[in-house]
Amino acid sequence: MNKKKKDQGRLRKGKSSDRKKTDNSQAKHWAREWLDALIWAAIAAIIIRTFFFGAYRIPTPSMEKTLLTGDFLIVTKLAYGPRTPMTLSVPFTDIYMPGVSLPWFRIPGYSEIERDDIVVFNYPIDVAPISVKTNYIKRAVGIPGDRVSIENKVLYVNGEPAQNFETLMFNYRVQTRERIRLSASKVREAGASIVQSGSNSYIINMTEETAGDMQGWSEVETVEKFVLPDDYDGFSRRGFNFSRGFTNHDNMEEFTVPYSGMEVELTSDNWHLYQDLMERYERNSVQRDGDRFIINGVETNRYTIQKDYYFMMGDNRDDSEDSRYWGVVPDDHVIGKAGIIYFSWDGERFLPRFSRIFNLIH
């Protein structure tokens, strides 16, 4: 009898041990399946992010009112062609291996950059490998070969006024009637913002339509675009000399956007236009003594451009640092074309902007 009970005890113990082994095996199988699924999902996400689409957030007002601070965008990389990886980096982070550059190429896209496209690109003058430079978004107002100039805030392309989008914003000088002040809340409700204020004079950032409406306010006497004088030079950048040949961001001499195969004659007067292009983007060694140039060890004052470049501007023309300040954007810095707003968050009201969700960008 005792022997039989012992045998039954051993049998129960064996069944319990087998059940635990089965449970452990199922748990391991379940964990392995989840791990495999996560790995494949990560690989798929990396492929999609690298070659198809990217998600970006607008952090500044430089593209208002076209794009607002807090807009979340889908950018298609297929439009202009995705770039193969340029660096060894940790996926979904800004961590990369310094000093290691991968041979890369751009897979052909289904379109070229067209004038006035809204483009995401790497900030050219960052000191870092191209693909890990800061992401910027601007409008390509000048494509390779275009002649670009600005006169009293008016952008000209190839001698004609550029397309005037209703979302463009500028600074306006607003004069009120004597001893009457503008209500800041009323200005905000109109979709504008006060940049500077005095006793009866204001600098206000707004669209042309809002400026026209404000002209009809009873407290307002005059509204006119605020244009910097020709001799103003407050926006030159120490260490970067693209803008030294231009007076200010409201007035810019005509400039041909460089293109691959374009031959330029270098002089002391135009060197500021091509220095970064030649040294930073096309990796030439240049020595200069007045109008005498030695390029890669050869004395010559002629140079053939190796890449296509783009002239970028923000739609908020008086609150955007763009090609007027830091120069043109090389084609290898282009990431993709802004496609759609998939979400928008109003940081002042702490509410979503439902009316902007799934809006196409143009």
Image (cartoon, rainbow, N blue to C red):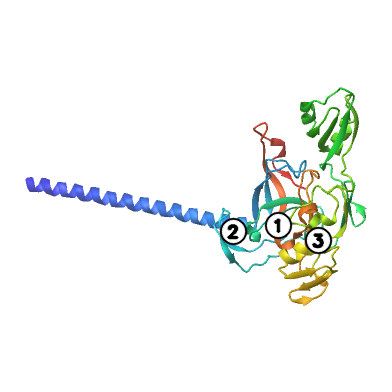
User: In the depicted view, which residue is nearer to us: 316 or 360?
Assistant: 316
Query: What residue appears at the point 79 percent right and 48 percent down from the top-left corner?
Result: 235
Do labels 2 and 3 touch, CB within 8 Å? Answer: no
When the figure is inspected, residue 100 is found, relative to residue 21, above or below; the finding is below
User: In the depicted view, which residue is nearer to us: 356 or 151?
Assistant: 151
Label 3 amino acid?
Answer: His
User: In the depicted view, which residue is nearer to us: 28 or 193?
Assistant: 193
Label 2 amino acid?
Answer: Ile
Secondary structure of the residue carrying tag 3 is: helix
The residue carrying mark 1 is 125
When the figure is inspected, residue 285 is found, relative to residue 255, above or below; the finding is below
Do labels 1 and 2 touch, CB within 8 Å? Answer: no
Q: Position of residue 359 (x, y in %)?
A: 73, 43
Q: CA distance from mark 1 to mark 2?
A: 28 Å
Give neighbour class at mark 2: few <14, some 14-19, many 20+ (Cα, 10 Å). Answer: few
Give neighbour class at mark 1: few <14, some 14-19, many 20+ (Cα, 10 Å). Answer: some
Mark 1 or mark 3: whose residue is earlier in sequence: 1
Secondary structure of the residue carrying tag 1 is: loop
Label 1 amino acid?
Answer: Ile
When the figure is inspected, residue 224 is found, relative to residue 221, above or below; the finding is below
Q: Position of residue 276 (x, y in %)?
A: 75, 62
The residue carrying mark 2 is 47
Query: What residue appears at the point 76 percent right and 70 percent down from the top-left corner?
Result: 287
Query: What residue appears at the point 16 percent right and 49 percent down from the top-left corner?
Result: 10
Number of the label disc, if any, that sits on residue 272: 3
Secondary structure of the residue carrying tag 2 is: helix
